[in-house]
Image (spheres, rainbow, N blue to C red):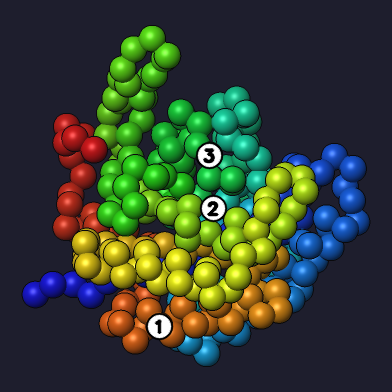
Amino acid sequence: MSRAPTVCVTVDFDGHALWLQWDSALSPTRMSRADFGGEVGMPRLLDLFATEEVLATIYVPGHTVETFPEVCRRAVAEGHEIGHHGYLHKDHTRLSEAQERAEFERAFAAYDKVLGLRPTGFRAPGGDLSTETLRLAAEFGIGHDASGMGHDVLPYYARRGDRWTPDGPLRRGEPLDVVTLPVLSSMIDVPQMDFLIQPPISGLHGYDKILRMWLDELDWMCQTLPGGVLTLILHPSSAPRGARLRVVRDFLRHARSRGVQFRRHREVAARFRAENPFSPAAPC
């Protein structure tokens, strides 16, 4: 019996941490985007998820948990998964190993203090992993990651220790006991829905076009890899603004009408592990 297609709705609830990294002037306008995300956008998304009976995975920096504790507690109370997203949304490719450890530890402390939990999933801030990020994540008990692009809709085990230079082929490292739940750039809201001068994002595409693109990706998966997992990535400072929220609603409704199962990342990772037990010697 074939499995119903799976969609994972995820949210990157970055808050002020995002702008603290990018905006050295700390513009009040930039900060107000984060205010909207925490005070307006995230509650709107949670309301929509409740109406549509969808449980999401919310990747949130520790700084954001401390800044918007009530809406984060609401998300937990309503059954959504909280994922590790760093403490201050720092680019892990620019951090030393000691700095990466500090980011993991400080965020875990915030999750414990504010929410009383310890996430088992991770998404790198900005989506970029260093060569050591997932090895460190595994040391901290992280079992699944949502940063990789080694496939479009099929989970796989990550690797550690890859090496590459311009003068020779990739030297693959060893399998790592972390399940990668891959992402598609076409399933991210911000590049389609938003406009920013710095960093440059020239979105503001027609909403019908965005919905059609997301549904095309779903149709392709259902037809080509029906056991796949399609991940939608939303940001509360973007997708819930004005009529954009209807795009998300319509996608959820269309997907459900096509027999999709909505799952949190931890559920998909657990299912993948059960069906594909980890072996240190297995190819990734």
Q: Residue at x 74, y 76 (%)?
A: 40
x, y percent for residue 249: 52, 82
In this view, the residue farthest toward the bottom is 51
Q: Which mark is residue 84?
A: 2
Tell which tag, 3 or 1, sits nearer the viewer. 1
Q: CA distance from mark 2 to mark 1?
A: 30 Å
**For residue 229, above or below residue 198:** below
Q: Which mark is residue 254?
A: 1
Q: Residue at x 70, y 65 (%)?
A: 237
**For residue 178, above or below residue 113:** above
The answer to which of marks 2 and 3 sits earlier in the sequence is 2
**For residue 261, above or below residue 197:** below
Amino acid tagged 3: Asp
The quarter of the image holding the C terminus is: top left
Give 86 or 191, whichever is nearer the viewer. 191
Label 3: few (<14), some (14–19) or many (≥20) C-alpha neighbours in 10 Å: some
Q: Residue at x 84, y 63 (%)?
A: 32
- Residue bearing mark 3: 128
Q: Quadrant of residue 162?
A: top left
Amino acid tagged 2: His
Do we see residue 218 in this rendering? yes
| SS of the residue under disc 3 | loop
x, y percent for residue 229: 32, 63
| SS of the residue under disc 2 | strand
Do we see residue 235 in this rendering? no
x, y percent for residue 203: 65, 58
Amino acid tagged 1: His
